[in-house]
Amino acid sequence: MGTRDVVDALIEHQGRLYSEEMGAEIARDAPVQWFHWLIGALLLSARIAAANAVAAGAGLKSEGLHKIDAILAADRETRIRVLNENGYARFDNRGADYIEAAAQLVKERYSGDLRKLCAAGGDRAGILKALQEVKGIGPAGAEIFAREAQLVWAPLYPTLGKPAEAAAAELGLPQDADALADLAGGRARFVRLVAALTRASLDGPAKAVTAAR
């Protein structure tokens, strides 16, 4: 078994994107999908299990609260309730406030379209800096957003991220984003590889990944 087998096993068994798990279809490159993923990155950046954050992101969508105008129209108690009922109880109050602040900022500064943030940011550093102007999004949250947004936003590619880098080291894979991108064999596969490595770092590698190693 070689590195290519490990990469293939990772993508096949742990390569589901966090964005798609919560229902944000970022490959469609539409404003509502990007805003939903921004909320997802915000939720994932808290000190809470990724599964809980994903459930909260999916729960918001099921209530229509992944859309800017719907969030701004909802009262605080509604946002808190939805987060609380979907595994985000520890951070429901703060999360409810952060989500509202994010909706306000994206609506006012980018007319509801985060693609304008990408264009204005220019390069990777600029985009990451702009993302951190969203309340609740720090360096970790910006990195979370970027590692899946790179599927569409070219200036972010290739982005690896610290958890994925750590898992790559454990699994004997290159820890350099460019080298891993070459090994993955394309941007879409690389993004799924990053998601898989992140999951391996947080949850442990799948049995098939360990066997391939």
Image (cartoon, helix red, strand yellow):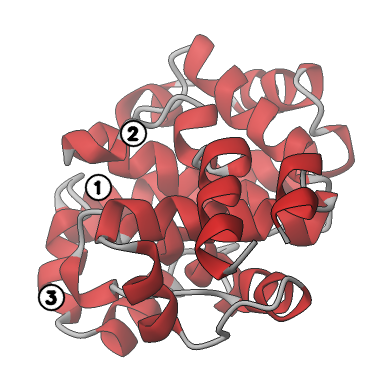
Q: Position of residue 171 (x, y in %)?
A: 73, 71
The first of marks 1 and 3 along the sequence is 1
The first of marks 2 and 1 along the sequence is 2
Q: Is residue 182 above or below residue 94?
A: below
Distance from Cα at disc 2 to Cα at disc 1? 7 Å
Q: Quadrant location of the C terminus? A: bottom right
Query: Which residue has dot 2 on it?
Result: 68
User: Which of the two marks, 1 or 3, is nearer to us in this view?
Assistant: 3
Q: Residue at x 81, y 41 (%)?
A: 207
Question: Is residue 86 shown left or right of residue 119?
Answer: right
Distance from Cα at disc 3 to Cα at disc 2? 20 Å
The first of marks 3 and 2 along the sequence is 2
Q: Position of residue 29 (x, y in %)?
A: 17, 41
The reply to whether callout 2 and callout 1 are in contact (CB within 8 Å) is yes
Q: Amino acid at mark 2?
A: Ile
Q: Residue at x 49, y 74 (%)?
A: 160
Q: How many marks?
A: 3
* Label 3 SS: helix
Q: Amino acid at mark 3?
A: Ala
Query: Which residue has dot 1 on it?
Result: 107
